[in-house]
Amino acid sequence: AQSVTQLGSHVSVSEGALVLLRCNYSSSVPPYLFWYVQYPNQGLQLLLKYTTGATLVKGINGFEAEFKKSETSFHLTKPSAHMSDAAEYFCAVSDLYNFNKFYFGSGTKLNVKP
Amino acid sequence: EAQVTQNPRYLITVTGKKLTVTCSQNMNHEYMSWYRQDPGLGLRQIYYSMNVEVTDKGDVPEGYKVSRKEKRNFPLILESPSPNQTSLYFCASSFVGDEQYFGPGTRLTVT
């Protein structure tokens, strides 16, 4: 089974500052990689995904993530945080041998200070 | 409107009383899945289904059953709920290999 590690269960940034949320996964062979966002009392919404091709992936709301195979990482960034970005963010990966199975990280709650 | 619906949204029940959480999608997706979300653990996959009558275990299937008799519906069944199944449950659907669309969640408390 894959494991997904998100460093920092809570991250706090000031409005306008860089957002960096970290995600590392366990396998040396790249699976499919995802970032989801969850607003309070809602389901999850896809921000972006990496399957193959370009390693820098752009998503919705100005977020992007870079797949680094050598570091087994898929960190999420946004150049300038908005108050509306406050939410919980989950990194997820597919199983290496079964793309129908998914493993999620424990989540990072992003707080944006005015 | 394209959506995944779950019912009920909130449920409090007692140990051992069978319950079913329904999930329905109107996007003609082949793939459907159930997850549970617990604080500090993120989401863990319970079961998934590739299509009608095709289901398989996820990471934490113990204590749960599913069925897929129609493409749009994927109910989650707890035959004998226990307190450790108190959790927030999400249903999701997608075309195979594509973005998953999540329902609004069902908060289950087992006393």
Image (cartoon, coloured by chain):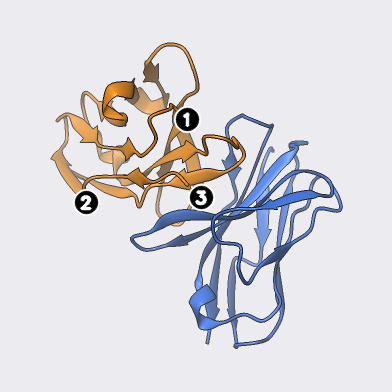
Q: Earlier in the sequence, mark 3 or mark 2?
A: 2
Q: x and y percent of residue A32 in the render?
A: 49, 29
Q: Which residue matches tag 3? A: A43
| Residue on which disc 2 sits | A10
Residue A68 visible to an observer of this rendering: no
Q: Colour of chain B?
A: blue
Residue at the image position 68 percent from the left and 45 percent from the top:
B32
Residue in the picture at 41% in, 23% down:
A59
Sequence-earlier tag: 1 or 2: 2
Query: Which badge, 3 or 1, comes first in the chain's sequence?
Result: 1
Residue occupied by mark 1:
A31
Q: Label the orange chain with its letter.
A: A
Discs 3 and 1 lie in a common subunit: yes
Q: Chain of mark 2?
A: A
Q: Is A46 left, or right, of B13 in this rendering?
A: left
Q: Secondary structure at mark 3?
A: loop
User: Helix, strand, or loop for circle 2?
Assistant: strand
Label 1: chain letter: A
Rendered location of residue A23, percent (x, y):
30, 37
Location of residue B63 (image quadrant)? bottom right
Check residue B52 in the rendering and tell me which mark sits there, or answer none.
none
Q: Amino acid at mark 2?
A: His
Q: Nearer the viewer, mark 1 or mark 2?
A: 1
Q: Alpha carbon of mark 3 to alpha carbon of mark 2: how far?
A: 19 Å
The reply to whether discs 3 and 1 touch (Cβ–Cβ < 8 Å) is no
Horizontal side of residue A11 vs A97, given as left or right: left
For this orientation, the residue located farthest to the top is A54
Amino acid at the residue labelled 3: Gly
Camera-near label (3 vs 2) is: 2
Rendering quarter of residue B95: top right
On the picture, is A74 further left or further right than B106? left
Q: Please report, as a chain letter, where disc 3 is located.
A: A
